[in-house]
Image: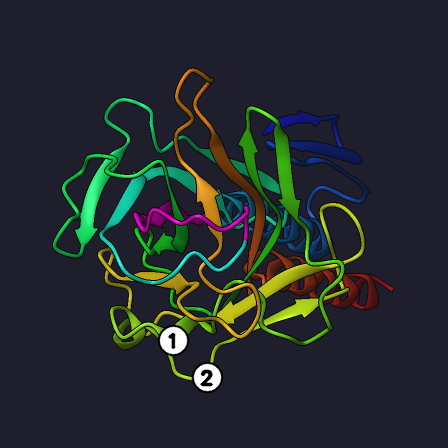
Amino acid sequence: MAGIRSPGMVYVTTFHGPSFLFFFVAEIDEGSSVMKKTKLFIFLVACSLMCANSVEAAGFKISLGIRETGSTMPIFGNGGSSGGIEWVDKDAQTLTADGTWQLFTFTPNAAGALSAFAGGTADSLLSTDTGTIEHIRLLNDEGITAPFRVWIDDVTNTVASGPVVENFDSAALASEVMFNEPDFSGSTAGNLVAGGTTAVTDAMAFSGSQSLEVATQFNSNNPAGWLRLTTFNAANLPNPTVIFREPGAPNPTISFYAKATVIPEPASVLLMGISVIGLGFVRNRS
């Protein structure tokens, strides 16, 4: 905060933040009650902007779960639901809940990428060249307990012949595609408030006109709580086949875009409060 005070009449204050540049100018008598209200208003604005910036940093650790099925189906065909499950880059990336689209890319055949999760053959090693996307893992490491939404788009398996993309544009609105509802998996349903939904929406998309929207809520601030958003026998595009490894070719990758928001967005609530305070200030001054 930088301030310039001229004798008697004018007080100018500037607030700088990562996303804000705020100017407040008041031509008032220094000793008046209005000046005191002005200072209080400026203080509240500064606090609110700092809180808003801290809210923007909230998020979840995000990882990919793959199942080693040895599928012979084409990419995104039903690759089956038996075989060990490995995590790829467990908790190494962050989905920031700031309402922006973010790209997440995973390379199952990269050195040290795998961590065993479940199944007798899960051993932190890649056992098959093909398999399925089994789930997206969201770790609540920041202890968020408010409802939140996640949108997923452009799920892509990039192989030697080029990328293969599922963007949900051909799916029926409100249908579950690829991923089940959040509390479908018994592994993590106990971490969630019941009643979460997964549905195709045309409200927003990274590309095209549709994406997959997930709405849910963690039931505690336990930083070890997580969500297993599984593809297991989903109603549409279940157990989607992906290629993990192609001998003699660069390592294939699995990627998708995601965005997240916490509801209600605390930053919006804070800024609404500022508007109410400002309106009261103006009325009192007049």
Residue with the most extreme bottom position: 195
Q: How is the protein colored in the picture?
A: rainbow
Pointer 2 and pointer 1: residues touching (CB < 8 Å)?
A: yes
Kind of residue at badge 1 = Asp
- Label located before the other in sequence (2 or 1): 1
**Residue 18 shown left or right of residue 123 in the figure:** right
Q: Give the extent of the magenta segment.
A: 58-76
Q: Does residue 141 appear in this view?
A: yes
Q: Is residue 90 visible?
A: no
The residue wearing badge 2 is 195
Residue at 56%, 43% in the rendered image:
256
Residue 75 horizontal/vertical position (percent): 54, 46
* Amino acid type of the residue tagged 2 in the rendering: Gly
Q: Is residue 21 above or below residue 4?
A: below
- Asked which secondary structure carries label 1, the reply is helix
Residue identified by numbered label 1 = 183
Residue at image position (82%, 61%) is 282
Q: Is residue 154 above or below residue 189?
A: above
| Quarter of the view holding residue 244 | top left
The answer to if 156 sits in the magenta stretch is: no
